[in-house]
Image (tube, rainbow, N blue to C red):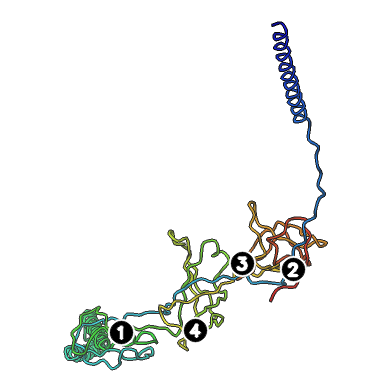
Amino acid sequence: MGDQSAKVNKTKNNWLRRNVVKAVIILSAVVILTVIMKMPAKKRESPATEAPPVNVTVMTVKAEPQLADMFDLPAVVEPNRIVTVSSEVGGRIERIPLEEGSKVRTGDLLVKLNTDLILPEFESAKAQVERDQIEFDRMTNLSKENAATQRELDNATSQLAISKARLEGISARLERTSIFAPIAGVLNALLVEEGEYIDVGKPVAQVVDSDTVKVVVDIPERDVAFFSVGEQAEVLANARDPNESLTGTITFISELADSKTRTTRTEITLDNRQRLLRSGQIVNVRLTRRILKDVILVPLLAVIPMEDGKAVYVVNSSHAKRCDVKLGIIRRDQVQIESGLEPGDKLIIAGHRFVAPGQKVNIVPEKK
């Protein structure tokens, strides 16, 4: 019995010893692992590698001696004058010698009115003047011989003046039965027919002077200050050849700007005897604000938009350098650089969007 109890105690002691050893080992491992984790990791420094060079194409910046600051605006062609001819007397239309579309000169007959009702009045007034003239002459002679009073002479003088005034009025009416063209141009419209009776003031014809035309353009408020009457302007009227132009002269600049569009009406007058322009035609006008000196122009695509402005890249000792620039006028696919570039700079015009400041570049020829 005593041996069995000793054996049991011995077994328990061995189990306890084994478990204590295991616990100590586990605890030691946990402590060591914790210490290792809290130890600062040793920094591994990797050797720096330089970015490979970027292939770019460059152009040498040059300054143009002078450049015209021009812009185009749409405009409308208007005739120099449009005259509506009206009748100054009433009557029946007897004859219309010309047809619509005919060229007319100043003084050409447009409409002839019937004179049957006016001629008898004219003949009567003419006869009255002749009779009053005889009476005036008689009274003048009698007055010289003191055979007529001054009053009788005055009455004869007044009567002659009245009859002459009446004759002149009827003569004017008779002359106005012939309606003539007041200006040279084209008989654009006949507004009456033969046989028609018209009253005083009735429009009978429209004459258009298009030998000289006005090209009307609305210039924006910010630009109108660059122009003045007497300056030259180009009118681009040939849709097939936009470079073919006619030269005109600025003859009118309105003193008042349009309150809605903030533009100013400007008229350009030019010779149109060759009939290259028609009234109502839409054309383009090329206006020159000013002539700029020593202008640097670069491709518009070489400019990179930035958050705080615009920039370009140039090559400086085989490395890319960023230059902040100020832009000026745009001419088709080129833009003026007002500041930020100097003549002689090697501007990157291709590959510039793949470089960074200070990056090494490799200059290659431009791809055709």
| Label 4 sits on residue | 271
Instruction: Pinpoint residue 85: horizontal percent, then vertical percent.
Output: 31, 82
Q: Distance between the residues labelled 3 and 4?
A: 32 Å
Q: Mark 1 points at which residue?
A: 189
Decide which of tag 4 and tag 1 comes sooner along the chain: 1
Residue 102 is left or right of residue 328, and the answer is left
Considering depth in this image, is 4 or 269 the residue closer to the camera? Answer: 4
Q: Is mark 3 on a helix, strand or loop?
A: strand
Q: Identity of the amino acid at label 3? A: Ile
Q: How far apart are marks 4 and 1 (CA)?
A: 23 Å
Residue at image mark 3 = 330
Q: State the residue lying farthest toward the top.
A: 2
- Left or right of 86? Residue 4 is right
Measured Cα–Cα span from mark 1 to mark 2: 65 Å
Residue 153 seen from this side:
no
Of the two numbered discs 1 and 3 on the same chain, state the one appearing first in sequence.
1
Q: Name the residue under label 2.
A: 58
Could you tell me if the residues under marks 1 and 2 are in contact, i.e. CB atoms within 8 Å?
Answer: no
Pointer 4 or 2: first along the chain: 2
Residue 354 position in % (x across, y down): 70, 60
Q: In this view, does 215 lie to the left or right of 329?
A: left
Q: Which of marks 2 and 1 precedes in the sequence? A: 2
Three-letter amino acid code at disc 1? Answer: Ala
* Other residues around mark 4 within 10 Å, as few (<14) / some (14–19) / many (≥20): some
Measure the alpha-carbon separation of dots 4 and 2: 48 Å
Measure the C-alpha gap from mark 1 to mark 3.
47 Å
